[in-house]
């Protein structure tokens, strides 16, 4: 029976699946009010459904009497049933209050756990809005409600924690509401995700990991949720605030029969590394715990993982370790991880008795192939830290990389395909270009020059080759040996750039100069000009320049053949410099080769002049792009490759170290003997900036043609290159003294303050650059004002012409306007006349009386009529017209022949 005064309210038609349910009446409990609301719950306009008064529900839940527990459970069930298709934004605050009350009651009464989970489940359903403005109006309430979900992780119930995670995951994988149950318009697709970011939910979930340290299932659900949240950069930053890397790494190797813990944690770590700033990454990943956890996880998977899933996860962990190793100061050496990675990278090529690799095999599977590439790449990353050079030496890395300097075969070792071996080969040679300059003694001990020259000889040979060119390093070399040649020459260029006399002498003794000239001949004759061929030729010229500089005997070895090969490169078409393939670099390297390999040897200089070499150089200077402009462009490109910091206008950013590149900045100062070149000195030989500076010094820094404002800004830096480089050397000296704990005695401290003077030079150059840019901006504004003034003048002239035409039309169509204009004209003429009359002078009128015209009139009138081209002229109807042109169709047109019959003479006459 229903309560007195209240009638049973039937459910909406679309919610009644059976006839039996139609006969049931819902009797409300005391404290719960049921009302008709035509807006809530209707599928279409006009439908009515049952609405729950949430304020009464809250009031009922706040009653402390245990006798109301059953009613409270019934009310919560109705609330969950009412919003089973989604929550309205204007109800979210009250729903959140109800959820909070249920969570508090679940601490003391377990029967409230199930209703709590049911209400939490509502958060995973689509949110709806009555008005378009509701998303903005209730943003704060939604943000607080979602944030509260994270706070409810403190509820000591596994079921509640798991349901919270499920609901949050549904934010990212929620199904759209079904149309038959859709009452109101759903919120925008990314609304919930945005509220999650504003509510700081990610940070709260990371902190909640401490509550489930011994609960594997709950821990997996939280990490799975973090995996979804970490796709957002904002969420990653919030997770970093809660020290997510440290917390995740501390549980990385926990016992987990499912294997999901390591997989999901590695995914979150990967996202954190990609979506957060380097400063935040450095602070948290730069610790022993994280690196040690990665080391243990990788080693365990490598040695004991046998499944396809284990191999994939192992590679993912290695990628994360590679990203971590790129952070300066990461304790890769202290944890022993670097030594193990070097061992795993080289144990196949260099046999080792280490028990870790005993019985370890690298198969030809795709995952193991990827592992090998990642390990070779790790060697390049480790080589950037000079502290790891000793480990690379002990691991015989140079010898291991030389293993790949051999001709390709149809099938590689360990069952690899030819394509796989080629990819590893190119990667190994590229790694050698980074490692060889650091381990030059190992390079020479293992006959590096001889190996490279023999491999280059194979690259030039006509032996059959099975190249695929599918890898990154094989770009442009499909079906040829160009990719192998390119990286071999890159290694040689890095080695000879050290200016080590022993290395360069060994190269020359092995016939390197003649072999390099052969490469130039064959690449020019055999291959078309593309990026890889031009890069090969550029490397050859740079190597020849380093070998022949300041050595007359080697210049003679370069010989006349070298000049015959060099001159065509100097005659390069100027249009090719803008092709983007690298012709500009090739031209500069050819000029550098001319300077180092020809000049200084009288025989070669004479031969160069005999072959019109001087005219070739003059032609270069007369190209559309001036030499200064080209050199400055190359300087900027070189600094971009080095990662030198400049602002958008090319100005200096760091006045203390204006020339430092990204790689040089990451290197720590290590005290070295006086005969060893420092990083600042090695930088001179590793790039073309010093050479460009020398050439521009010869050209002069004043009155250089064809330069823009940006070029002048760069030129200000080039002009002070030597001062900046000296400042770098002094900075290294001061840093080494500080590193060795030397304290200079007077007056040397004052001498060491010279670095401040060089910093002042940087500030002076920056001020000069700013002044140049402001001057250029002022000139541009002046030109812009002139342009606008010209446009304004044109518009004004058009307006005057238009106004004159309108006045003309007015005078010709309105007689009164014509008389007024005539009167004004006569008045103006009268005013302009002199008031003083000459004595005994006779004044004659200049106008004709009675004319109402406003133009200057005379006694002769020219009447414009129909043009004679259309009428045929005044003699068009006479016989004389036939002697000129006939009339056809109202106009004169030429015809071949007209026959005229003379009736008197009875003859005919043909006229053309």
Image (tube, rainbow, N blue to C red):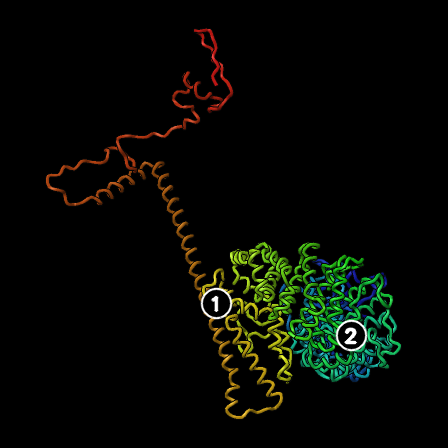
Residue nearer the viewer, 74 or 199: 199
Q: Which mark is residue 288?
A: none
Direction right: furthest residue: 359
Residue nearer the viewer, 529 or 499: 499
At a point 55% along the width and 58% down the height, the residue shown is 609
Q: How far apart are labels 1 and 2 at the CA level?
A: 48 Å
Report which residue position mark 1 lands on: 701
Task: Decide: few, some or many residues near mark 1? Use Cα within 10 Å; few <14, some 14-19, many ≥20.
Answer: some
Q: Is residue 852 above or below residue 803?
A: above
Residue 623 appears left or right of 371: left
Disc 2 secondary structure class: helix
Residue 315 image position (x, y, % from top left): 79, 72
Q: Of marks 1 and 2, which one's residue comes earlier in the chain?
A: 2
Q: Quadrant of residue 865?
A: top left
Q: Quadrant of residue 26?
A: bottom right
Direction front: furthest residue: 603
Q: Which mark is residue 399?
A: 2
Q: Is residue 504 visible?
A: yes
Direction left: furthest residue: 840
C-beta proximity under 8 Å, tags 1 and 2: no
Residue 287 image position (x, y, % from top left): 71, 83
């Amino acid at each position: 029976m229903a309560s007195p005064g209240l009638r049973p309210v039937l459910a909406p038609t679309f919610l009644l699946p059976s006839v039996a349910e139609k006969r049931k009446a819902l009797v409300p409990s005391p404290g719960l009010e049921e009302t008709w609301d035509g807006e809530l719950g209707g599928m279409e306009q006009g439908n009515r459904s049952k609405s729950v008064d949430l304020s009464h529900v809250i009031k009922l839940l706040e009653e402390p009497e245990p006798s109301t527990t059953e009613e409270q459970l019934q009310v919560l069930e109705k609330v969950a049933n009412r919003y089973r298709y989604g929550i309205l934004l204007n109800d979210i605050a009250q729903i959140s209050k109800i959820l909070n009350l249920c969570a508090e009651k679940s601490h003391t009464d377990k029967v409230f756990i199930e209703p709590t989970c049911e209400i939490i489940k509502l958060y995973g359903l689509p949110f709806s809005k009555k008005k378009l403005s509701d998303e903005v109006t209730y943003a704060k309430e939604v943000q607080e409600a979602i944030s509260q979900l994270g706070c409810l992780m403190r509820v000591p119930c596994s079921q509640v924690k798991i349901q919270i995670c499920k609901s949050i995951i549904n934010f990212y994988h929620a199904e759209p509401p079904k149309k038959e149950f859709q009452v109101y318009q759903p919120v925008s697709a990314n609304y919930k995700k945005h509220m999650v970011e504003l509510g700081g939910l990610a940070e709260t979930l990371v902190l909640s990991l401490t509550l489930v340290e011994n609960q594997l299932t709950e821990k997996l659900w939280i990490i799975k949720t973090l995996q979804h949240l970490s796709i957002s950069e904002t969420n990653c930053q919030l997770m970093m605030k809660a020290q997510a890397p440290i917390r995740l790494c501390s549980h990385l190797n926990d016992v987990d029969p499912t294997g999901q813990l390591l997989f999901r944690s590695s995914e979150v770590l990967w996202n954190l590394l990609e979506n957060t700033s380097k400063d935040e990454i450095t602070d948290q990943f730069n610790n022993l715990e994280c690196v040690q956890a990665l080391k243990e996880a990788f080693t365990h998977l490598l040695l004991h993982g046998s499944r396809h899933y284990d191999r994939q996860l192992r590679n993912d962990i290695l990628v994360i370790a590679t990203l971590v190793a790129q952070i300066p100061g990461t304790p890769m050496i202290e944890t022993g991880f670097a030594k193990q990675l070097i061992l795993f990278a080289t144990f196949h090529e260099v046999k080792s008795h280490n028990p870790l690799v005993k019985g370890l095999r690298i198969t030809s599977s795709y995952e193991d192939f990827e592992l090998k590439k990642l390990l070779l790449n790790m060697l390049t990353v480790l080589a950037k830290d000079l502290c790891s050079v000793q480990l690379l030496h002990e691991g015989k890395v140079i010898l291991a990389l030389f293993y790949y300097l051999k001709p390709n075969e149809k099938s590689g070792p360990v069952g690899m395909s030819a394509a796989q071996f080629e990819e590893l080969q190119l990667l190994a040679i590229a790694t050698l270009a980074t490692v060889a300059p650091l381990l030059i003694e190992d390079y020479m001990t293992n006959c590096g020059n001889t190996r490279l020259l023999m491999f280059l000889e194979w690259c030039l040979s006509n032996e059959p080759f099975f190249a695929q060119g599918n890898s990154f390093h094989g770009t442009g070399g499909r079906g040829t040996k160009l990719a192998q040649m390119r990286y071999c020459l890159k290694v040689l260029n890095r080695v000879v750039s050290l200016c080590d006399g022993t290395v360069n002498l060994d190269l020359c003794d092995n016939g390197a100069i003649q072999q390099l000239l052969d490469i130039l001949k064959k690449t020019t004759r055999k291959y078309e000009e593309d990026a890889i061929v031009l890069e090969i030729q550029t490397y050859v010229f740079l190597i020849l320049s380093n070998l022949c500089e300041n050595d007359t005997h080697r210049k003679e070895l370069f010989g006349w053949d070298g000049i015959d090969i060099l001159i065509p490169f100097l005659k390069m078409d100027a249009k090719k410099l803008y092709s983007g393939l690298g012709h500009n670099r090739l031209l500069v390297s050819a000029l550098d080769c001319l300077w180092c390999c020809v000049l200084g040897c009288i025989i070669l200089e004479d031969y160069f002049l005999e072959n019109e070499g001087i005219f070739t150089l003059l032609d270069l200077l007369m190209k559309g792009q001036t030499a200064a402009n080209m050199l400055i462009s190359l300087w900027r490109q070189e600094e971009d490759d080095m990662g030198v910091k400049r602002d958008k206008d090319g100005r200096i950013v760091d006045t203390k170290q204006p020339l430092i590149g990204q790689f040089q900045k990451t290197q720590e100062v290590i005290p070295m003997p006086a005969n060893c070149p420092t990083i600042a000195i090695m930088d001179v030989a590793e790039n073309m900036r010093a050479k460009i500076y020398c050439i521009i010094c010869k050209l002069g820094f004043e009155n250089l043609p064809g330069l823009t404002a940006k070029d002048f800004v760069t030129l200000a830096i080039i002009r002070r290159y030597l001062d900046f480089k000296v400042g770098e050397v002094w900075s290294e000296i001061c840093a080494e003294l500080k590193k060795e704990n030397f304290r200079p005695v007077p007056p040397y401290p004052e001498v060491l303050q010279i670095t401040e003077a060089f910093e002042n030079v940087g500030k002076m150059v920056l001020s000069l650059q700013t002044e140049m840019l402001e001057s250029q901006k002022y000139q541009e504004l002046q030109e812009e004002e002139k342009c606008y003034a010209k446009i304004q003048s044109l518009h004004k002239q058009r307006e005057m012409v238009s106004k004159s035409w309108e006045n003309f039309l007015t005078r010709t169509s309105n007689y009164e306007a014509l008389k007024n204009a005539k009167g004004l004209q006569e008045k103006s003429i009268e005013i302009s006349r002199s008031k003083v009359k000459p004595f005994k002078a006779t004044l004659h009128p200049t106008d004709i009386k009675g004319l109402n015209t406003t133009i200057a009139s005379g006694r002769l009138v020219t009447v414009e009529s129909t043009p004679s081209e259309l009428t045929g002229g005044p003699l068009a109807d006479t016989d004389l017209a036939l002697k000129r042109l006939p009339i056809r169709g109202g106009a004169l047109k030429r015809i071949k022949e007209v026959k005229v019959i003379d009736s008197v003479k009875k003859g005919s006459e043909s006229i053309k």
